[in-house]
Image (cartoon, rainbow, N blue to C red):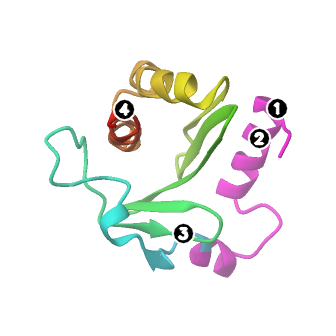
Amino acid sequence: MVTTVRDYALFLKAVAAAEGYSAAMAADRDRVQTDKGDQAIVDCASPSATACPDHQGYGLGFNVLRFGDATVLEHGGADWSEVSLAYIGTPSQDGIIIFLNAPNARALAAMPELIAQIDPGSPFLGEYQRWLSNARQP
């Protein structure tokens, strides 16, 4: 996919506001469709977990984290030349977008620090720290 941060922000805002689709579809979007099992986004047993979601897993096109009445929708990606993270909360519509165009190892090494600087309480910080730690192991 080729996009700009601005256009992706507009897309995420439209998703969070359920523009163009029904309230029923929005409710289905916010529902965890499949549990991620041992690949959970937030490791609630970790001392670095800032908050443990009530429910987390795969949704419709997004990872879904439920915190009481609030939902966080996240999508990220990585390949040999980029690492990205985008998430938005509902109903708050607060979120972040980070697109890094760099060799994967460099971008991945930068991602935890960027998340910590932009959103220190991010539920995704631990996931990127684990991903980086696993990438560094032989």
Q: Which mark is residue 30?
A: 3
Tell me if residue 36 can be seen: yes
Is label 2 in a helix, a strand or a loop? Answer: helix
Disc 2 marks which amino acid? Tyr
Q: Quadrant of the C terminus?
A: top left
Q: Residues within 10 Å of mark 1 (few under 14, many from 20)?
A: few
Is label 4 in a helix, a strand or a loop? Answer: helix
Label 4 sits on residue: 136
**Foreground: disc 1 or disc 4:** 4
The Cα–Cα distance between marks 1 and 3, rounded to whole angstroms, is: 25 Å
Q: Residue at x 83, y 66 (%)?
A: 20
Q: Earlier in the sequence, mark 1 or mark 3?
A: 1
**Foreground: disc 4 or disc 2:** 4
Disc 4 marks which amino acid? Arg
Query: Are the residues at dot 1 and dot 2 in contact (C-beta closer than 8 Å)?
Result: yes
**Foreground: disc 3 or disc 2:** 2
Q: Is residue 26 magenta?
A: yes
Disc 3 marks which amino acid? Asp
Q: Earlier in the sequence, mark 3 or mark 2?
A: 2
Label 1 sits on residue: 4
